[in-house]
Every structure is written in C-alpha cells, then in structure tokens.
Amino acid sequence: MDPHERFFRFFEQFHFQKDMEGYIGIEREFFLADDQGNIAPESPRFLARIHDPAWTYELSACQVEHRTQPARDNSEILRNLLKGTNDGKRTAQDMKCLFLAKEVAPEDMPFITYPDPRYEDMVERLGIERLRAACRVAGIHVHIGVRDIFHAIRIYNALLSHLDALIALGDHSDGLRIALYKIVAHDWKPKKLDNPADFFHLARAHGFVHDPRNSHQLIRISPHGTVECRMFDMTEHADEILMYVDTVKQIARRA
Amino acid sequence: MRNDEQERRMLAAFDASVKTLLTERERFIKNQNMSVVGLESEVTLYSETDENTAISVRDQAVEMGIADMELGALQVELRTPPISVAAGISSLHESYKTIYERFLALAHANRVSALRIGANPFLQTIGAIRSKKEKYARVPDFNNHFRRHELDTIIGLRGNRVDIGDATIISLFQAFQVNLEARSLDDAVDLLNRSLMISPFLLALAGNARYLECTDTGYNDLRIHAWEISHDIRTIEDLHIGLKGRMGLPEKYFTGIEDYFERLRRFPFILYSEDHALQIAIGLAWLDARIKFIHNSAIVELRSLPTQPTIKEELVLTAFYLGRLTFSQITNEPLLPFSLLEENRITAITQGLCGTYWHESNGVIARDSGICVLEKEIDKAQIGWNTRWNTCGEHFELLYKILRIGSPSDRLAQTLRNKGKVSRKEMLDALQKTNMLI
C-alpha cells in the first residue's frame, strides 16, 4: 500500500458527522460484586440478563460499561444517565449482586477477563502487572462530537492545554486511578497535534494506525467522530458527570 | 455580595427559631385529615400596546387585595384563603372563581389580558424586568454572581436552543401551588415525601412551559429545570459528594422534620432579617414541595406545577393531588426508591406523557409508558378521593381526557404545528386558541 493510500485508509476509520457536532456521549464503567460486596466476574450473566445495546463488556469480567445515546441538552444526558443507572442497579439486584460506581477496586479482586477473542492478545501483551492495573480501574469517558479532523485537532489541543486541571477535576482517589491508568497505558499522555499528518504519524508511532481503538491517551480522537476525555474517575453522582460535560463543552466552545 | 457575619447571625437566629418550634410541636397537631387547602396561581398581565397599563393593573390588583406582586414586573399571584375541603372542593372552587373573576374584570376593563402559561414565551430570557423590591434585586444577583462559570445554560431538545443563564429568568415563569395543612409535623414530613414522589406524574399531565422567546424547546415543562440551572451555585466539592441545590429534589427523602431543617440551614440566607430567619430559609427553599409554617399550621406546599390554561384544570389537578396523597397514606404505600423518582422527574420535565415512568403496581416496581402509568395513577387518585370524600369525583374525567388530548404544552405545540420558531403573531393566535390568553 502506498503512503498516500495508508494515510487515507487511516482517516476512513473516523466517522465524523457535521450534524453531530457538539453532541455528547458518555461511557461509564461499573463494577459488579456479590451480595457480600466482593468484586465478582458477573458481567456475562449481567449482559445476558439486561439484554440492551446500551450495555457492553470490558476487559475485566467484573465490569460492565454503559453508553448513553448522543445528546446535546444536559437534561437529556441526565435522563440517559439516570435511566442507565436504574436499569443497571435493578438488573444487578435481580441477580442478587451489587452494582458499584467505584473508581478503583481492591487489589485482591479477581483478575478474570471477559471471554472475547480481542482480549486474548491483549492479556498476553499486557503482562500480569498491567493487566491487574487495567482490571482495577473504572472511569467516565466523555465524548464530544466534532465535524471533521481539523475541528477534532483544534478541540483535542484545547483540551490538552487543560489536561492537568481536567485530571484534578475528576480525581476522587487521590490520584490512584490515574496512576494505575499510566501503568496500563504507556501512551497515556496526549501530545499536541499540528495537523492531520501529525496525527497519522502519532498513530504509526503508537501502533493504532490500523485500529484507533488501540490508542489509550487520556484525550484521544476516537473513531466515533468524537474527541474523547478519559481522565475522569467513576462517580455515582449524575450531576457531577454533568459538571465534567460542561467543562469539556466550555473548552470545546472556546477552541 | 455575601456577608459572612450576617450569614452567621442569620444561622444562629434560624437555629433558635427551629429549637422553639420543635419544643412547641403540639401546637401543629390537628384533628382532621387534609381538611384545609389553599391555592396560589401566578398569572402574567399582557398588553399588546402598553406595558405601563399592565403594570398599573397589577398595582390596582395588589391594592384591592386580590393579588400579590411577584418577581416579574408583569406578574401577579392570585390566592385563595385556606378553605376546608372536608365536603369536597366545591367551596374551594367558588372562592377561587370569585377571586379570579374579579381580577379578570379589572384586567379586561383596562384592555389588559391574562396570560395563563408556565413560561412567558414573549419576553427575553436574559435581563427580564424585575419588580422593585429589595429581595428581587438581591436574590437573582446573588445567584448570577455565584453560578459556576462552566455551567451550560443553553437548553433545547429540538433544533433551536435558548440561553437561560440569568437567575431573573424565573420572572418569566408562572406556577400553580397547592397548600395543604398537615395534621402534625410528622404528618407534614410524610406528606412532603409522598408529594415529591407523586409530583412527576402531576407534571407529566400538567406541563405548560415549553416555549421561550417564541422558540420551541421541546420540553414538556422547562420551568423547574431552568430554575435549577440558572440558580446552580454548587461548588465542585458539593458535586463530588452528591449535594443538590436548594431547588428541585433533595438528595433523599426526608427522615423527619429535623432532617428538613438541617437541609434548610445548609444554604446561604442572602436576605438578612434575624427576626424572619426561618421564613427566609423556607422562602428560598425552592424544592418541588416544601413545608412552611403559618401560625399554628404546618403546611405542605406543592410547587412543581405550572399555571394551567383554566382554573378548572387547576382544580382537577388539586383533586388528583389530594386523592393520590390520600391513597398513598391510607394504603401505607412504600415510597418509590429515590433514584427512580429522580428519573421520573426528569422524564416528566422533558418528555411529559410521551416518556416512560417507574411506578408500583401490585407490589411490583416496573417502568411503563406514560399513558399507561398515568391511567393507573389517576385510578389510584380516584380511589383515594372516593375513600376520603365519599363522592365519585366526576372531575376526574377531565384527567382521563388530558391523557387523550395531551398536556397544555402538547396542545400548544400541536396548535403551532410543531414549528421550531414562531412569530409573535402566531404565538398570540395559538395562545388564544388554547385558552392561555384570556
């Protein structure tokens, strides 16, 4: 494949949509625990029971992820968040499990991964220390829709200039979650981008040129056509999540 | 803007008043159950050509004792005296009708109309004109000053969006409030919790605040949500630990009257008059329902509903509220888990009858369509009403009709053919057709 083609193929993986500009999507990672509060690998049972595309698995079989529908208005985001939490809680209750909004699980939690072929390689690649760290952390990812790659780079750079403040804003664990995240993702630190070519070079250097999902920067341009902030610790408070959203929106507005 | 010394003094005065009130709790004990009710309803004066005439009508109405002044310069509040409803709501109806007709006669004599809607669709959302009173200057200014700067104050579920980032926005809003005397302080807390639980069902039916600046926000009723956003002065630390603001829902159901007072004392007083510390704290507690104290009465006030197009609709909602509360108390209904109430509330605000709601049916909690849930809720209210008042309450028919024809917001949007942005003339015509401009 010639370099030009490689370049265009890379960008074809990003689904930017003009009419989704400014829309917000939120991913939240929840832990599942048995009725005694011990973190437990219950995600296969949970997902089979809830049977809802808003829910999916994570690397750790002790976690599930909820994704909201993209929305612009905070009231709609709030309704989606509350609906997700209530559905999750009730499903866990039916399973006689606990549903936990917790940013870091204890060290003695089970390290069992979800049975997905994508994770087999990953487990191999990560090694035991990084795998343990990856399984213990749960965060909130805020996506903001962008119209094209140029817009994405502008917002990405603007968010990057507030990285430390954003990390502090979402920190509930005295920095423990982010410290563990850094153990897992060697490429955690986003780097300033000048243009799309820069982004392409970064993707090649960090090994996500064939699959942008393999970028684990705390701020990343995602294949969903969004810029994604991954630095916020998990919280049970929907209003706090809206505060993260408002902060991201405000920085994006000024970009 | 905020005087810490005065705040400290107010808090001490508040604590002293609460202590006295709690030692005198027997004085709030009443023999009869839910017997005394009073209504308050806010209406906006509207003049096509002359705002000063509208303001003069407001002043005359206040002078004549038919109405009270409100934050918005063109708003008035009509209120009935406390009336016994031991024999049903006919006496309440008579009293309200008399006051309303006197007010309407005064307005019409001056060629001024009454706008009966939850959100004034004509005024600018930023910088609305306020009535001239100290509290109307200080309280909005305080909230504007301390509102978090990153807060997204632009709302709208459809294409067009409107900025509500000014605490004076509440001068565009009209509410209809039901005041209910409790049998005791414990009963007041019980009624308060049940009112919070029932409130979203009422709001789904009653939504009447959808348009701002002639723009369709797509909300069933944006009023209490806009209030929450424009007055959100919580700090990042507050949000980290899950604290709510002074409006809307509390963090959980109240466990007792002490818990209620404990929450009240958390917020700045803003207005300083030590002799009135308790009243000021309650006056600024903009919850969907609250407890207030007048002489020897503990009163539960339902605050989440917008003014309705007709007083008949307000009365039938009152009957729904009283009947549903009675049902809840006599069956000792378990309170819906608070997180489900939170979801119901935001659904009522945004989607109204088109949303899905959590409810309890035969001991099972489930989420169902708005129409299905509301039908069951009206049935429960009717059972409560019939049990308590021993009449079959023919007014409930209107509630079932609303399920078919939609909330006032739905009806206005249908009349405006769901256009995102309308002209002033189109809005005036639609308001007349839907009985919201009289």
Image: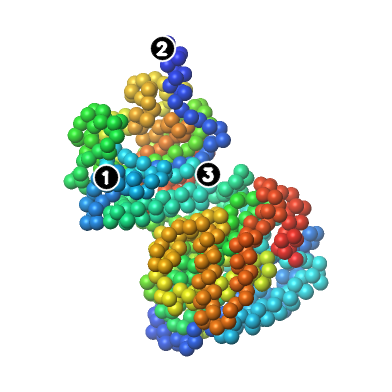
| Coloring scheme used | rainbow
Rendered residue at 62%/64% (across/down)? B402
> Would residue A18 be found to the left or right of residue B434 on screen?
left
Secondary structure at badge 1 equals: loop
N-terminal-most mark, 1 or 2: 2
Q: Which mark is residue A62?
A: 1
Separation of marks 2 and 3 at Cα, in angstroms? 40 Å
N-terminal-most mark, 3 or 1: 1
Q: Give the class, few, some or many, for how many residues have Cα within 10 Å of label 2's Cα (few <14, many ≥20).
A: few
- Residue carrying label 2: A1
Give residue B139's position: percent from left, percent from top. 55, 63
Rendered residue at 43%/59% (across/down)? B366
Q: Which mark is residue A72?
A: 3
Q: Chain of mark 1?
A: A
Give residue B398's position: percent from left, percent from top. 63, 69
Badge 3 amino acid: Arg
Separation of marks 3 and 1 at Cα, in angstroms? 31 Å
N-terminal-most mark, 2 or 3: 2
Give residue B160's position: percent from left, percent from top. 62, 45
Specify whether residue B177 is in view.
yes
User: Furthest residue to the top?
Assistant: A2
Give residue B251's position: percent from left, percent from top. 41, 62
Separation of marks 1 and 2 at Cα, in angstroms? 41 Å
> Would residue A15 be found to the left or right of residue B426 on screen?
left
